[in-house]
Amino acid sequence: MKELLHSAIIAGILASIEVMNYYTNGFTTEYKEDLSPVTNADIASNNIITESFSHLNIPILSEEGIHFSKTNRNNWEKYWIIDPIDGTKGFVDKTDEFAVCIGLIEAKKAKLGVIAVPAKNVFYFGGENIGAFKFALDFKNWEKYKEMSTLDEIINHSISIPLNNKSNSYIFLRSKDYLDSTTQEYINSLKTKHPNLKEHVVGSALKFGLLAEGFANEYTRLSTLNHWDIAAGDAIIKSAGKKIISSENKKEIIYNNQEIKITGFYAF
């Protein structure tokens, strides 16, 4: 597991550097059938990550790749699940809130994850029986981590999370672009339990990192997400000793359906 997490970190760094090159120097945007944007930076990130993993002989499920059927995935002992740019809308709108997300699914559960948020200069990673960590420095300095040959060396130059953040408020993270009525009703109900509740609006998988590091108390979304939207965050949340469960059955999230989607989650 350590070797695979090390590989995921290196891939996340390489992809982030390439994505920021497009972010700074210009990119082209097209729109999918569902009207969601995709840029040439998404494709470049996908290509870099898949190439980085080519020697590992582990299948890859990517938002910008082939969406393999449940039958195919059931035959895989483990597989990578990738969102080359999570929050492409934020990338296009220049909000700085977008992330490179890489997760590993084994036995239909998220086992390790990387969430790189280069425009915010923060990189989260974690794995089962390893713990969760971050490094928070200018992404241009991430190159030095790329030269580290082992996960232990990277961990020695990182910050263990969660941090001991204290707040008098109950901080609830919610999506900038995808607030549905069911989640809003849930937030309203929470306010009766937590009169001191404050909503913090954030785009992309950055929310998982903020919860894992202890900035917030909860991030819940009760609407449909794709597996690649959540796998990396799922693994990091669990690795940080926090809880994330399916809204459908209140159990650990299982990556095993034809639609490659979940109906929602509670994370706290």
Image (cartoon, rainbow, N blue to C red):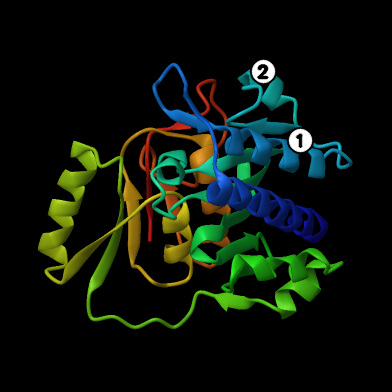
Q: Quadrant of residue 225?
A: top left
Left or right side of 123 for 246: left
Name the residue at 75% across, 72% down.
154
Question: Can residue 213 be seen?
Answer: yes
* Residue at the image point whose x is 75% and y is 30% from the top: 76
Q: Which mark is residue 77?
A: 1
Q: Residues within 10 Å of mark 2 (few under 14, many from 20)?
A: few
Residue at image mark 2: 71
Q: Secondary structure at mark 1?
A: loop
Which label was assigned to residue 259?
none
- Sort mark 1 into few (<14), some (14-19) or many (20+) by Cα contacts within 10 Å: few
**Residue 58 location (% of width, % of height):** 80, 37
Q: Amino acid at mark 2?
A: Thr
On screen, residue 188 above or below 26: below
Residue located 41% across and 57% down the image: 207
Q: 47 or 24: nearer the eye?
A: 24
Q: From the image, which quarter does the C terminus lie in?
A: bottom left
